[in-house]
Image (cartoon, coloured by chain):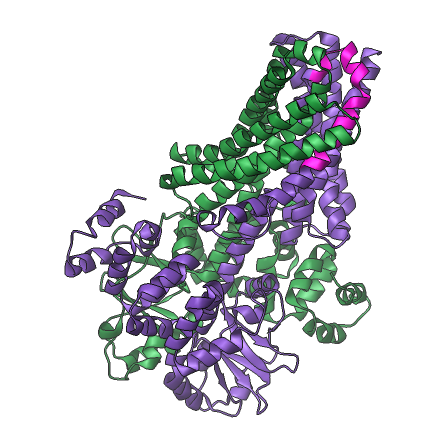
Chain colours: A green, B purple
Amino acid sequence: MNENIEKFRESIPLLGNEELKELIKDIPFNDLVSIWDDLDTDEALKILSLLDIDDKVDLVRSLSPPRQEELIRNLSSEHAKVLLDEMEPDDLTDFIQSISPGVREDVYSHLSEESREETQFLLKFDEDDAAGLMTPRYLALRSSLSIAQALSWVRQHAKDVETVYNIYVIDHQKRLIGVVSLREILTSDDNEIIENIMEENIISVKVDTDQEEVAKILEAYDLLALPVVNEDQKLMGIVTFDDIIDVIREEQTEDIYKMGAMGGSTERYLESSIVALVKKRIPWITILLIAATFTTNVLDHFTSLMTAATVLALFIPTIIGTGGNSGTQSSTLMIRGLATGEIHLRDFWRVMAREIVVSTIIGFFMGILIILRSVFLPPFVGLVPAIAVGIALCFVIMVATMVGAIAPLLIKKLGADPTVMAGPLMATIIDLSGLTIYFLVAKAILGL
Amino acid sequence: MNENIEKFRESIPLLGNEELKELIKDIPFNDLVSIWDDLDTDEALKILSLLDIDDKVDLVRSLSPPRQEELIRNLSSEHAKVLLDEMEPDDLTDFIQSISPGVREDVYSHLSEESREETQFLLKFDEDDAAGLMTPRYLALRSSLSIAQALSWVRQHAKDVETVYNIYVIDHQKRLIGVVSLREILTSDDNEIIENIMEENIISVKVDTDQEEVAKILEAYDLLALPVVNEDQKLMGIVTFDDIIDVIREEQTEDIYKMGAMGGSTERYLESSIVALVKKRIPWITILLIAATFTTNVLDHFTSLMTAATVLALFIPTIIGTGGNSGTQSSTLMIRGLATGEIHLRDFWRVMAREIVVSTIIGFFMGILIILRSVFLPPFVGLVPAIAVGIALCFVIMVATMVGAIAPLLIKKLGADPTVMAGPLMATIIDLSGLTIYFLVAKAILGL
C-alpha cells in the first residue's frame, strides 16, 4: 500500500464526482480492490458509480462474496441489472452460489431471461468440476462454411461470447467434431472450407472432470480455452484460461493450509466466523495432540535413565525439533515432487539412495555442531554426554529424513493425499522413533 | 500412470514407426511427458520423430533442462534446426539459459539469423523480470489505419507472432499509445479508424517489473497478454498468459519449499546433485539447530524442578509439539493471507482479537483432553500434575498462536519475506516461551 492510494482513500468524502473520476484513472486496479474493505457502503457505491462498466464488472468479480452481496443489495435496481447483465455466465453462477438465499431471489429478478436460463443451466453442475467453470457463451459453427463465411459470422457474433479466439465446429447433433482458432481462420484463404483447416484431434474435457485436472490439461497445451463435452461428445460449454488461473491459486491456498495442518476450506480469514476458524483448526490439533502424547509413554520407559543422567532431558526438545525439521525438508520435497509429477512412485529406490547420502552428510555435520555447542557454551555438558548427544542426533536426522521421504510416497501408494496425511503421521513417527533412538544410543555410550 | 501408457511404453522397441504413430495419437500429451524419463535416448528420438512439429515443440518445452539438452545434442543438425526455429523466442531464451555453455554454441549455430538476434536481445534481461518472460513477436500498428486495413495487415502477419489477439498501437518512436483487441477490430465497422477504438488507458509493465507482480496484474485484469515497455514508454515485447501460469506454478513451489525450511531453488529433485540437495537443506537446518539449543539453557534452569517432579519431563515433547502446531496454524493463515492480499498490516488488531478468542477456545479443549488422557491412560500420572500440565498446555497454545500470528505480520512490517523467516523465528520463540510457561505454571500449581 503506497501513499498515493492512502491519500486517494482520504479524499473520497471530500471531492466531487468529476475530480474523483480523474483521480481514479491513475489508480492501479489492484490498489482499488485493496482499499475496498476500508470504504463504507456509501463511499463504495460512489466509487463504483464512477467506473466504466468493464471495470465495474472486474471489481465486483474481485471482491469477496460478502462485499459483493453488500454492493448488490445497495445498488439501485437499474444499476444492479446493468452490472449483472455484463457479468459472464460462469462468474455470475459463482456469484449466485456464494450469496445468501434471500439476496439470490433478488439477483434472479434482475437478470435478463437469457442470463437466468444460462445460470440455471450452469447451477446444475458441481462447482469443482469442469462444468462448474464453463461458460455457455462460445462460438460454434458448421464444418461446411467457407473461411469468408466463417469470418463474417464470427464478426457478427463476437459481442455475445466470452472468447472469439477459439471457434468450435459441431455437427447437426451439436457433437464437437473440430476446433479452429481465429488465427487459423485469419491466415487461411477466403475460399478454403472450415472442414479442411479444423483440428480434428480435439483436446477436450468431460463435464465431470475435476477442475485441477482441467488446469493441468490447459497448462500442458498452453490453451486459451478448453471445450467441455458430455458423454455423447456434445459440446456443453468452454472453460477459459482466466478461470484456470483462479483454480491454480485456490489449489495453492488449499495445499498451503494442508501443510499448516488445517482443513481445506479457502474462505478468507477476516471473513471467517470464529466458529469456522476453530472448526478449521481443532480437528488436526486434536489428532496431533493425541499422537504426541505417546511420547509420554516412550519417556516414561526411560525415566530411570533420565534420573541417572539428568543432562539427557535437556536435549529432548533439540533432538526431536531437529528430527522434525529434517523430516519436514524431505517430505516437502516429496510432496511437491509428487504434486508436480516430477517424482513418481517408481522412483522409490532412487529417492531412497539420495536421501540416505544427503541425510548422512547433514547428520554428520549437525552431530559435530551440537557436540561443540554443548561442550563450549552453557550449559557446558561434559564431553562424553555431548558425544552421546551428537551421535544420537546424527542417527535421529538420518531416520527422520527417511521417514519424511517415505511417508508421502507410501500414502500416495495407498491412494490417499500425501499433502494432508504426511505431516502428522510423520511428526508422530519421528518423535517416537527419535526419542527411542536418542535414549538407546545415549544409554549405550554412557554405559548406563 | 495407467496401464495403457505402460503398455505403450513397452511396445516402443517392438513396433514399427507407422504402428507407433497410430498409437501416439491416442496417448494424452501429459502421459507422454510423464514416461519420457523412462525412455532411453534412441527410444526418445524415435518417438520425437513421429510427432508433428507443434507437439515436438510442446514436448521439448515440457521436459527438464537436462533432458532437453540431451535431446538437442542427439538430434541431427537438420532436425534440431527445424525444432529450434519453431520455438517461441521467450521459450528459446529460457532453454538457452538452462543448457550448458558447450551445447549453447551448438544451439546458436542452428538458429536462423532472426532467432539469434531475438534471443540475444532477450538474454540481456533478468530472468525473473517482466523482460525475462517477454517475446518480441507481437503485432504493433499505427493509429491512423482503418479497421479494414488493420484486419488485412493482421491476416498477413498472423503467422509470425505469438498472439494475434491483442494488437498494440505505437507512434513513430515506437512508444506504446494504445491497445486494441482483435475482437474489437472484428466487431467494428470497416471504415472506422484504429485511433477511435483503441484503449488508451493501457495496462503495461516495465522491463524490470518482478515476474510475480506481472502475474498479479495479468490475473487482476484477466488479460491474455501484457505489453512490456522501457522507461521511455517504448514497447519492448509482450508477456503472454501461458508464461504467467508457469510463473504462478514456480512461485507455488518456492513458497512450499520455504515453508518446508529450504532454499528457494526450484530445480527438479531427481535432477539435483547431492551437493545441491545438501546445500538447499543445510543452511536452515543449521540455523534451526542453533536456535533450538537455547532450549537446553531453559531446561537447565529448571533441572531441580524436573528432579523434584520427574513426571514433568514426560510432557516436554507434547507441550512444545502442540505449541508448535498451534503456531504453524496461525502463521500459515497469516502468511497466506498476506500473500494473497486478503490480510493487510492495518488489520493487525482485528487479527489479534480473533486469534485471542480462537486460541482460548482451542487451548481450553486441548487442556481438558490432555488431563483426561494422562490420568486415565498410561503413564497414569496423578490428577494434580495432570491438571498442572493441562493448564500449562492451554497457556502454551494461546501464546504460541499469538506468536504464530504476530511473527509474519512483524516480519512483513520490517520489509522481509514472512514465508522464509516466520517458521524458524516462530519455532524458536515458541519452544523457549512454551517451556518457560510450562515449568512456571507447573511449579506454581505443584507448589514446588
Image quarter of the N terminus of chain B? top left
Farthest residue in the front direction? A383
Front residue of B212/B9: it is B9
Q: Is residue A45 left or right of residue B105?
A: right
Q: Residue at x 41, y 88 (%)?
A: B153
Q: Which residues are magenta?
A: B289-313
Q: Position of residue A317 (x, y in %)?
A: 68, 26
Q: Is residue B99 magenta?
A: no
Q: Quadrant of residue B229?
A: bottom right
Residue at (25%, 64%) from the top-left corner? B49
Left or right: where does residue A434 sit relative to residue B43? right
Can residue A126 be seen by looking at this rendering?
yes
Vertical order, B348 against B56 (above or below): above
**Closer to the camera in the image, A400 or A69:** A400
Name the main secondary structure of what is drawn in magenta: helix
**Quadrant hosting residue B82:** bottom left
Residue B84 image point, x, y percent? 37, 72
Quarter of the image with the C terminus of chain B in it: top right
**Residue B307 percent across, percent down from the top left:** 77, 12
Residue A279 visible (yes or no) = no
Using the rendered view, name the quadrant where residue A424 is placed.
top right
The residue that appears at 35% across and 65% down in the rendered structure is B73
- Please provide percent x and percent y for residue B34: 35, 51
Mark count = 0
In the rendered image, the vertical position of residue A125 relative to residue A279, given as above or below = below
